[in-house]
């Protein structure tokens, strides 16, 4: 099952520092998920200054429970980077 994740960072003065600190571990885990076929696409949401303020991903897991298990262990969640997370069922219509 595919899911669209839209996750916004906190807006406090330490938000960018938390993202920077957690980013290497987040990217490592995302690369492993990509290799395993779970991440279809992912990237940063940018503000008008082109600063990262969140993330969006399209992922594929067997179930919402499997997605939630991964999500609760992601460094952006455990590092308190993502503070507003929306998960929606998704179906890819066009692929390259």
Image (cartoon, grey):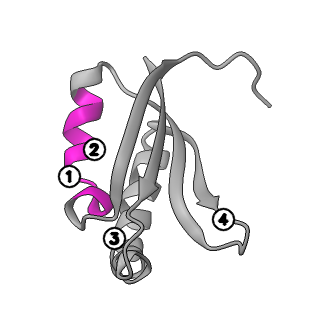
Comparing labels 4 and 2, the label whose residue is closer to the camera: 4
Looking at the picture, how far across and down is residue 89, in whole percent?
Answer: 46, 18
Residue at figure coordinates x 32%, y 20% from the top left: 62
Indicate whether 82 appears above or below 5.
below
Q: Earlier in the sequence, mark 4 or mark 1?
A: 4
Indicate whether 85 appears above or below 13.
above
Residue behind mark 3: 25
Looking at the picture, how far across and down is residue 47, in whole percent?
Answer: 66, 65
Q: CA distance from mark 3 to mark 1?
A: 11 Å
Image: magenta residue range: 66-77
Q: Earlier in the sequence, mark 3 or mark 4?
A: 3
Residue behind mark 1: 73
Residue 20 magenta-highlighted: no
Task: Tell me the crowding category of disc 2: few under 14, some 14 to 19, or many 20 or more residues within 10 angstroms, Cα based.
Answer: some
Q: Residue furthest right?
A: 96
Callout 4 secondary element: loop
């Amino acid at each position: 099952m595919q899911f669209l994740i839209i996750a916004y960072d906190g807006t406090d003065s330490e938000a960018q520092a938390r993202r920077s600190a957690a980013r290497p571990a987040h990217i490592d885990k995302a690369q492993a998920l990509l290799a395993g076929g779970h991440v279809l696409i992912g990237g940063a949401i940018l503000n008008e200054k082109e600063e990262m303020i969140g993330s969006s991903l399209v992922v594929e897991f067997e179930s919402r429970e499997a997605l939630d298990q991964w999500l609760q262990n992601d460094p952006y969640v455990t590092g308190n980077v993502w503070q507003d997370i929306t998960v929606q069922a998704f179906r890819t219509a066009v692929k390259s």
